[in-house]
Image (tube, rainbow, N blue to C red):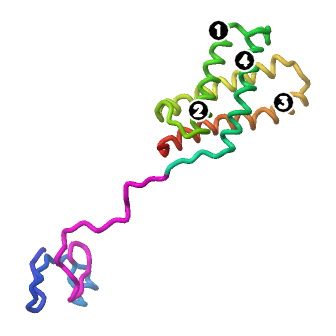
Amino acid sequence: MMAAINWSGSENWCLVNFSTTQTEAKRGIPKIMGKAINKGEDLQNLYQAPESSLDDNHPIYSPSVAWRILFFVMLPLELLYQYFAFTNDSGGSPTWWLVVSLLISSLFYIVLFGLAFGKRIGFEQLWIFYIPVLVLIDIFEFTLTIIGLNLSMLSNVITAATSVPIILFGWYIVYKYQKVMKFFE
C-alpha cells in the first residue's frame, strides 16, 4: 500500500510504501521505495538518480617495450624462414601449403605489430575466429615436423618440450591482442 505522508507539519511530503517487514512495522519505521527513512532526512529528490562516480574515461592500453623488441626479433626470423621455405625444398611441402602457411603467419605478425604499437587492426571477432585457425595450423605443422624428422623418442620429447611453449605463447599473443584492442586510443 502506498501513501503520502507529511512529517509533523514540514513541507516535505513523501511517498511511503507500507509493505514493511514485521520488525520494521513493530518499530514504526516506514519504507520509501524499499529504503527505510528517518525523520529529518531530505526527501526533496526522491526520484532523482543517485550520483555515480562513473565517467567516460576508460583504461588506455600502452604497449610495452618488450612487445616491440619481440616484434623486431621475430619478424626477421620469420622472413628468413619463409624465404628458405620457398627457395629450398623444405620437407617436400606443396606450394599451396607454403602459401597458406605464409598467410597464416602474416596474420600473426599483423597481430604482433598491433600489440607492439597499440594499433587497432581489424575487429575483435576477426581475431576470435583466427585463434582456432592458428591452433589447428600449428598443431598440423608441429605434427608434420615431428613425423618428418623421424627422430628417436627422446629427441621427439625434447623437440616437443622446447616447441610447445613457443607455440602456446603465440596463441597467447593473439588472445591478448583480441582482449586489449578495445582499450586502444
Main SS class of the magenta portion in the image:
loop
Q: CA distance from mark 4 to mark 2?
A: 18 Å
List x then y, in percent, for residue 122: 48, 30
User: Can see residue 25?
Assistant: no
At label 2, the amino acid type is Val
Label 4: how many Cα within 10 Å (few below 14, some 14–19, many 20+): some
Q: Which residue is mark 1?
A: 96
Choose between 114 and 41: the one closer to the eye. 114
Q: Is residue 134 left or right of residue 92?
A: left
At label 1, the amino acid type is Trp
Label 3: how many Cα within 10 Å (few below 14, some 14–19, many 20+): some
Q: Which of the marked residues, 3 or 2, is nearer the chain's N terminus?
A: 2
Q: Which of the marked residues, 1 or 4, is nearer the chain's N terminus?
A: 4
For discs 2 and 1, the disc positioned in front in the rendered view: 2
Query: Which quarter of the figure is the N terminus placed in?
Result: bottom left
Which quarter of the figure has residue 37?
bottom left
User: Can see residue 67?
Assistant: yes
Q: Which residue is mark 4?
A: 82
Q: Which of the marked residues, 3 or 4, is nearer the chain's N terminus?
A: 4
Which residue range is magenta in the image?
32-59
Residue drawn at x 59%, y 29% as measured from the top left: 110
At label 4, the amino acid type is Gln
Q: Which of the marked residues, 1 or 3, is nearer the chain's N terminus?
A: 1
